[in-house]
Amino acid sequence: MTEINQTFSNNLKQYREKRNLSLDNISSLTGVSKSMLAQIEKGSANPTINTVWKIANGLKISFTELMTAPEENFEVVLAEKFSVLTEDDGHYRNYPIFPFNDQRGFEIYRIELDPGAFLQAEPHPSGTQEFITVFAGEIEVEFLDQKLIAKAGEGIRFKADTKHSYHNPSDKLTTINMVIWYETQKDI
């Protein structure tokens, strides 16, 4: 059995058991036969994408919830594993530490801005907020005709669902931690 099928099998079984649902209940909700559901839970079936969607829609949960392995109790992210995203000819460096995950609703970055570095950012989805902590240097954030400045040891929070920019106005390297929190709407 492939890893993704094993994950799907485990998630479906855990969902059913957690809610005290029988295979008959799940079948009624999803339109997928009881025998197919039993095979999926045993790991002896290779469900199609359409079958997974039928199950997700019938249970009113996301496709991702069925197909994503649960997080471990901990995670250590080693610096040498970081990939770097650059802007402003490499003067703005973004290191994704914890990328977005539906279960968390946020993502965390370490960002370095060389002296004079600048980045113009597009609006994030409605309701999104950014939380910035400055560890070294100084950051200037502009949005909605506001200019916010924070130095080492300080922080900034702002609604990031409009155009905004980041600038290092100092002559020293600026290092920040950025948490982007996404307001989520679940129809469940």
Image (cartoon, rainbow, N blue to C red):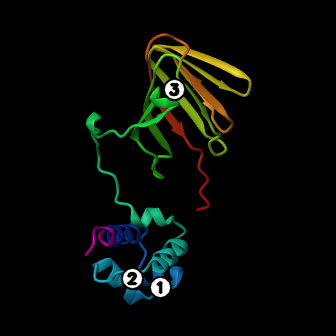
- Per the picture, the main secondary structure of the magenta-coloured stretch is helix
Disc 1 crowd rating (10 Å Cα; few below 14, some 14-19, many 20+) is: some
At label 2, counting other C-alpha atoms closer than 10 Å, the crowd grade (few under 14, some 14-19, many 20 or more) is many
Residue at screen point 51% across, 65% down: 61
Disc 3 is placed on an element classified as strand
Q: Look at label 1 and name its amino acid.
A: Val
> Residue at the spot x=44%, y=88% of the render?
33
Q: Secondary structure at mark 1?
A: loop
Residue 187 screen position, x and y as percent: 62, 61
Which picture quadrant has residue 148?
Answer: top right
C-alpha distance separating marks 2 and 1: 7 Å
Q: Work out whether mark 3 precedes mark 2 in sequence or the reverse, and give the earlier one.
A: 2
For the residues bearing labels 2 and 1, Cβ distance under 8 angstroms? yes
User: What is the quadrant of the N terminus in the image?
Assistant: bottom left
Q: Is residue 127 above or below residue 131?
A: below
Q: Say which mark, if any, is on residue 132.
A: 3
From this viewpoint, which residue is outermost toward the front?
Answer: 89
- Left or right: 47 in relation to 29: left
Q: Which residues are magenta?
A: 1-6
Q: Which mark is residue 37?
A: 2
**Side of 53 where 35 appears, left or right:** left
Give the Cα distance between marks 3 and 2.
Answer: 46 Å
- Above/below status of 108 relative to 156: below
- Image coordinates for residue 159, horizontal then vertical, percent: 64, 33
- Report the amino acid beneath label 2: Leu
Point out the tag, 2 or 1, that comes first from the N-terminus: 1
Question: Whole-percent x and y of residue 141?
Answer: 61, 23
Q: Which mark is residue 32?
A: 1
